[in-house]
Structure formats: C-alpha cells, structure tokens
Amino acid sequence: MSTAERLKAAAELFPDEVVTTAHVRHLDLPAGAGRFALITLDNGLDHTKPTTFGPRSLGELDAALDQVTAEAERGEIVAVGLTGKPFIFAVGADLKGVELLRTRDDALAIGRGGHDVFRRFAELAVPSFAYYNGAALGGGVEVGLHCTYRTIAAQSPAFALPEVFLGLVPGWGGCTLLPNLVGAERALKLIIENSLSQNRMMKAPKVHELGIADAIFDSADFLEQSLHWTSAVLRGELTVERPEVDRGEAWDKAVAAARAFADSKVHGAAPAAYRALDIVAAAKDGDVAAGFAAEDEALADLIMGGELRSGIYAFNLVQKRAKRPVGAPDKSLARPVTKVGVVGAGLMASQLALLFARRLEVPVVLTDIDQERVDKGVGHVHEQIDMLLLKGRVGQDQANRLKALVTGSLDKATAFADADFVIEAVFEEMGVKQQVFAELEAVVPEHAILATNTSSLSVTEMASRLTHPERVVGFHFFNPVAVLPLLEIVRAEQTDDAALATAFAVSKKLKKTSVLVKDAPAFVVNRILTRFMGSVLASIDEGTDIPTAERALAPLGLPMSPIQLLELVGPAVAHHVAGTLHAAYPDRFTVSPNLGRVVAAGKRAFYVHDSGRPELDPEVLALFETGDVALTEEQVRDRALDAITEEIGLMLDEGVVAAPQDIDLCLITGAGWPFHLGGVTPYLDRSGVSERVLGRRLLAPGVADVPA
C-alpha cells in the first residue's frame, strides 16, 4: 500500500480532523542564490488553535512534497523550506484522532504514515530547511529533524518532545534522529528528562545551544533573516559546523543515566519511557531505517495501550475541563477586586500575598497579632520578589511595583475597610477561624468576599455565626502555592452565586485550576490522600516494616512514596487532618498512634540524609510501637487501593464533586498524580479494583481506556 493510500484509509477513522494544509510558494533567495520553494503549514484558524498532523494533514504535506520533489528533480529549485503560520510551527499528532484508533494495524499505519511523509525532506535532491517560527512540539519538532538544516525564532515559547509524558514515544523520528544529531545525552534531556518533569518546555536559546537549531534569529524578522542565512549556506559563504556525535561509552552512559531518571520518576510503571530508551540505545549504530521501524512498532503498541489513553484523558482534563470549571456561576455575577487582605503573616499567608500581588496587581495587606510577625511576613514576600528579580522572572520596575503593593498592618479596621476580598490563613482550628471571621465582618465593606484557606474544616460551620454567611467561600490552595495549580473552591451551604462567581474570577486571574467542591470534610485531595496514607500507616502500625510499605506503591509510578508524601505534607498537618476526618468518619479514618508520637516529639521528617542518601531516622523509628502482623507489598498495595476506591465511590455518591473527572483533575494538579495513570479513576477501572470494591466502573467504558 502506498503512503497516499495508507493515509486515505486512516483518514476515514478521523472524520472531524482539523486539516493542516501545506501551501507551496516560490521566491527568489537573496544575493542570487536561486529559486526556492517554501512550504507553510496552516490550519486556517487563529494562533490559539495550533496546527496538528492527522492523516489528512499528512496527506496535504505529502502532496506538497510531490510537487517540490518534481521541481527539485527538474532543477527548477535550489532548496525547500518548511515553516508554520504566525506564532506556531506545528504541535505534533492530532491526539483527538489517536483516541479513535481501534486496532493495532490502524495505529501502525499512522506511525508509518508519518515516517513516510517526513523522511521525504531528507530524500530531496536539494537541501531542506526547517524554520521553527513558533511553538514546536512532538511531530512538529520531528518533521524539522528530517530536514538538512534548522533555524529557530528567538522568542519561540515552547519546544518539546512531550510524548513520554503522555504515554507515547517520539515516534516520527525523534528517538532515532535527535540522538544522532546532538548525541544521546542532549537528546534524552528532551525525550526523557523534560518530558517526565511535568512536560517541561524548552526555550529557543537552549534549543540553539544544544545544537538542534543551527541558527537563531529575532522573531520580528525571523523568516527574512532565515532566508538570508539559507542563501549564505547555499552559496557556500557559511558552513554549518556540527560536533561529531560520541557513539562510544558516552552514549551508553547517557542511556543508563536517563533510565535511572525514569526509574526515579515512574518506578518502572510507565512503559513509554523505557520503550523510548530502548530505541535510543539501539540508535547508536546510526541505522535510521531500523530506528524508524522500531519507532513504528512502539507507537502501535503504545497507542493501543492503557497508558496513552489515560495520558490523553489527563491532558484533556488539564487543557479543557480545567478551563471550564463545572458548576461555576455566570462570570457576570463576579464583583471587581481592587484590594486584597490576608489574615496571618506566616509562610502560607506570605505565599498567598505574593501570588495575589503578582497576578491581580492590586494592593495586598497582611495582618497578624504582633508587629514582629507582620514585618517577617512582608519581609518574606519582598525576599521572594528579589529572588524573582535575580532569576530574571521580573524586571526591576516590576519588582519595585510588587514590593510597593504588599504592606502590613496590625489594624484590621483600617487595613480592610476598603478591601474587596479577604482570605484568612491562620491556625487550623475552628474557634480561631470563627473569631477571625467575626472580626472581619465588623470591618470589611458589605460587598467584600471572605475566603478561608482551610484544608479540612467545615466552611459552613466557620460562617455559621456571621450575619452574612452567604459571602464566605472556601479557597483551598496547595503548598507550594506558586507551583501547584489546583485551587479547591468550596461552596458552603449559604454561599451565594456572587461570592462563588467572584472566587472563580479571582482564581482565573491567579492562573489556577479551579474545581468546585461541596463543603465536606477535607474536600477532595486531602480526603483521598488521608485515606490512602492512613491505610499505609495502619499497615505499619500493625507490624509491616516501613521499607516494605514504602515499596508497596512503587508499581503505581507515583511521584513519591507514602512516607515521602507524609513528609511533604508535614506530620503535624497530616495528623490534624486525620483527626478531623476520624471525627467525621470514625469507621473509615484512623489516627495513627505512631504518627501522633512523631508529632509530639516535634519531628518533621522521617528520613535523614547524613550519608548522602535518605535513611530512616533512628530517633523516629525508636518512637514506633508496632504489632506483629506483617503484610506483603501486594497486600499493602491492595489494601490502600481498596481504601481509596471506596472513598472515591462515597465522595461521588455524596456529590462532593460533579464527576469522577473532577477527582482526577484535583489529584493531577494538586497532588502530582501521574499523567500516565490519568489521575486515579482510570487506573482503578483498568486494574479492576473499582469493580471489585464498588461493583462498578468509575468512568464510562472506553473513557481513558483501550476501546472494546
């Protein structure tokens, strides 16, 4: 079957593909270098709708290559260039279409179709040039790798191979061509390290520094400069020097190091990373045809596997559902926020103050019980602004403006008299928070929204003694505030639409992922994680040794072990939340006596790092009193998964969130739950745990899973 026939057959599976056309135009290169054919990729939509490669789009590019191939063979052109529409080069395969594939042969056809089209740039009778004029991801990066030369626009915002993050491999040449261009170590930085580091994007200067792009030009006149550069190359005035790739021990060491990095991130649980590593390892011999064949087979296997389906599901959650929060009131009801108050000046309060100042660009006032604490809180914010300045994240003028926006006061009446939004971040105790809200209601304007950053307490009870409880809303951030995107927005029993709409509007300006949750103990993330950690701690309390309990969850590929997670949350916070949930649900949530002893002893960590590697603190171990029932890793794992499955089922029955997708969105953005699991519910469905525990799937059949 020819490439055109293969792509035509595949196109029948993608009836709704947004087609990327490939326009060919001709121009005379500067300085008399000759006639040039420039192919421009464009899907006819604005720059917010990036160009992608589905089967029809590949067919369009294939037809354009038919034309320029014939022109090159007739001697009518001296070179071929490839670029994209404004701000976008191309962002890879059409993932919407990938979801529709039903058989391995269909998946294999897509892999081969991409290779068959892209490789034609390397087979032309004339040199080919890729002009990365904007964002280039996945297949967008790979099509350029098939070209003879590459330039990149200096202000291009994103350059990445995100396939492993989603559960694929860079399968249209990335695993084979990139290491043979820049060496295994540099290639694996994109393929493995960046991808598994929450899909980190690379800026244009780094792309040039790594040798992926041969030249870099300012975006303002990028194409003009690229064409002048092309002319100089073709006329022999400029020679592109590329370091020789080390195909010896350095290659093997790079693969081994990347494998160790993958182990640290996914613990062997995500097959895509290891398939990519195997292909890169084999690419050492420079056999491009064998490499492409290996990429095709890997794509076919992974496209039909659960990891990719879960990855696409997770990607759609953070790209689509997160932008349209379910249950949010009409945004027209939101009130303007021109000044923010923060009650408390501790670490969390300081983080909040900086975030509000940076994103809303309005005055922010911190208050606390004494001047020393206020000064310390404001000082911390100013220190963080200085750090942003040193890192080049803000300029000097912006840093000065931010510092001027954040101030402190001991007088709530004066500080908050004109505040539109006041959030408390004080000690997690109901009486304290009720007192704070009573004080606030007496001094803030009638229209002001009162928010609480509580992690587990009832917002309804917190507002119950107020004259106007309808303006109180939960605004639960996750630590560190600047890093974790999630914001659980809690609607208490009397919260009105105006308060809720304002909360969502503020969250959007803060660039947070908002999920509306019911006012239930510990809301979503903390409730699930507390049940999860409670199960593991119960196994330890009963007699399972800590290393066994730690290893038990490794097959899930979670970003950290249960005890590491406990350290991140903080033993005291975890113990407090466990107590709150035990009071609400004593039959399901326990309070570990050993964790209580750790907190009473003032211990904040379970591990020490004196030897350069983490080891359990003997002083912590000495506090533990355990039974004699030692479970296996599998038993600990099954027990923990059964517990969170039961809890998720109950939360859905109670209407804590609108749908299972919201639970997954919360865990991905608030707890770092892996993309390759799709959050948690796809994994529980795929592994059969949800049907075993609940007698039903959590998601509809085919959602985030291999189609039947």
Image (cartoon, rainbow, N blue to C red):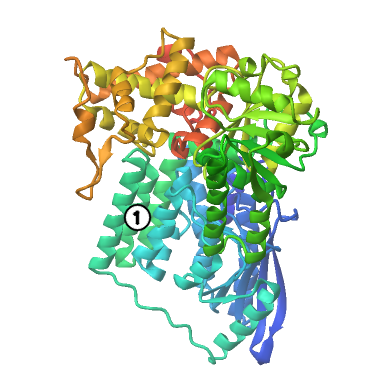
Residue sticking out furthest to the right: 332
Q: Name which residue lies at 71% across and 77% down.
A: 26
Report whether residue 309 is seen: no
Residue 542 screen position, x and y as percent: 23, 16
Q: In the image, 529: left or right of 51? A: left
Q: Name which residue lies at 79% across and 31% down.
A: 445
Residue 664 screen position, x and y as percent: 52, 30
In the displayed structure, 248 sits above or below 592; it is below
Q: Residues within 10 Å of mark 1 (few under 14, many from 20)?
A: many
Residue sticking out furthest to the top: 587
Q: Nearer the viewer, residue 516 or 312?
A: 516
Report whether residue 490 is seen: yes
Quarter occupied by residue 652: top right
Residue 422 screen position, x and y as percent: 68, 34
In the displayed structure, 565 sits above or below 657; it is below
In the displayed structure, 335 sits above or below 275; it is above
Dot 1 corresponds to which residue? 279
Quarter occupied by residue 605: top left
Q: Hey, what amino acid is under mark 1?
A: Ile
Residue 343 screen position, x and y as percent: 62, 34
Q: Name which residue lies at 41% across and 42% down.
A: 301
Q: Nearer the viewer, residue 673 or 82?
A: 673
Residue sticking out furthest to the left: 628
Q: In the image, 615: left or right of 268? A: left
Q: Nearer the viewer, residue 525 or 586?
A: 586
**Secondary structure at numbered mark 1:** helix
